[in-house]
Image (cartoon, grey):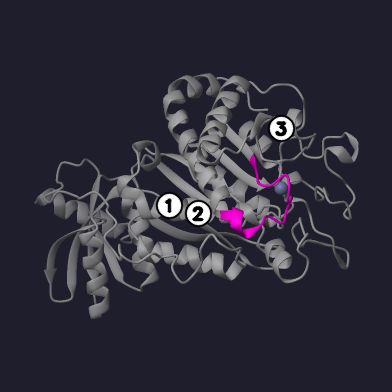
Amino acid sequence: MIMILYEAKSASRNGGKVARKDGRYQVWEVKCLKEGQRIFLKSLDAKGAINICQDKDNIINVMVEGNRAMHVEKLLRERNIIYQVTVTDTTGKFGPPYRVKSPSLIVNRHKSPSKGIMDWKDFYPLETINKFLDSLEKHFPSICTVSVMGTSVEGRDIKLLKISNSDASNTAVWLDGAIHAREWISTAVVTYIADHIAKHFDTLSTSITNKDWYLVPVVNPDGYHHSHAVDRMWRKNRARFGNTITGVDLNRNFGNNWGRSGGNEFSSGDPNHINYRGFEPFSEPESAAIKDLILYSGTPFKIFLTFHAYSEVISFPWCYTADPCPDYVNLLEGGTVMAKAIYDTNGRMYKVGNFKDIMYYASGTSIDWSYGTARIPFSYLVELRSKQDKFVLPKDQIEDTCKEALNGVKALAEFVDKKKCLNCDVYTSKKVR
Ligand SMILES: [Zn+2]
């Protein structure tokens, strides 16, 4: 008891701030001034995100697992619920008096969050995609968190959805779409995967639930909006050069071998060129947002997947050279596992290989950076359908493309777990390039 009081005192000396991830359990004193706030807290308790220990007058004492603290903090802050940390149990010897339940997805199980907002029978504008992400967070608050990871050139939010059971031992997966504006199917695929993981989290295999999923359906919101509203074939972001909006090819703006020469085949220094690389590495807020999120998250990312259209290939580093990367064999094997799962779904044959071999030269790409600088061992650029229809994929192929991509990702997640130790040890001993 004396010990608890001491802990409480030291917590208040720290201004009552949450000691993130440094304690196994914390006790929070939450003030519920409105009935709605109390109901919300009880719903978190029912889902196992917190444990209510005491409920008296307007004060509710709850236990929060250290590694869930950030997530719960965000949920309370969004609803203007006042709380303070009263006990930070750094040793774990006090708790938990009540068993902390595993998170489950009880809320609105019968209702589909996508229902009425979007489906995968059509392509949708940015506002709809963002609403869809928010609805996932609303329906599955114990595992879904939406945040703004950055702001585009024209001031639009770049929204990130994280799906996670907050287990501290998780590794992370990155999935993004629409770095190139007109490649709409990539956004459909990322939202489809998000929807599937959030809705079926309870029944999915461990190779999915043991990971933190970071999903960004629209990396380039300005370009995406422009391709919907004005020019269907717009590719770049909406950066200005002088008085003209010429745009930067965000997939030539990353800082690994940025601007490496080779004429316009690699990337271009001409603002009017479709592969304009920008004036310096990460000159654009959209690519810089990815860099910052990944480098400063402190999360060990194992998988980086960026979706494009339309060549039906699974490619991996390097893009800037024809030389094989150090993990060529592992990446080829992982890519082949993905391609097999895709083939088994719909009979579609995706080619696998290093980017230069199956596409062309490119420098300053996101996968060369994620692999070579952020050291994410399984980095892939997936070109979705379709070779026949190019960027304008018929709507009746959206769902099939999403299903095959989801199965490819699931197969990769499983493969990476099996390769875990071998690959990590090999990789960390290598020099960053
Ligand atoms: Zn692309």
| Label pair 2/1, CB-CB below 8 angstroms | yes
SS at badge 1: helix
Give the amino acid type for the residue marked by disc 1 in the picture. His
Q: Is residue 361 above or below residue 231?
A: above
Residue at image coords 79%, 54%: 248
Q: Which residue is mark 3?
A: 355
**In the image, residue 4 lies at what x, y percent?**
15, 52
Q: Nearer the viewer, residue 410 or 273?
A: 410
Residue 390 lies in the magenta stretch: yes
Q: Residue furthest left?
A: 1
Give the amino acid type for the residue marked by disc 2 in the picture. Tyr
Query: Taking the image as drawn, is residue 17 in sight?
Result: no
**In the image, residue 150 lies at what x, y percent?**
60, 59
Classify residue 206 as left or right of residue 398. Answer: left
Mark 2 residue crowding within 10 angstroms, few (<14) / some (14–19) / many (20+): many
Classify residue 241 as left or right of residue 122. Answer: right
Residue at image coords 60%, 57%: 396
Q: CA distance from mark 2 to mark 1?
A: 6 Å
Q: CA distance from mark 1 to mark 3?
A: 29 Å
Q: Earlier in the sequence, mark 2 or mark 3?
A: 2
Q: Which residues are magenta?
A: 382-398
Q: Which residue is mark 2?
A: 192
**Is disc 2's CB within 8 Å of ligand 1?**
no
SS at badge 2: helix
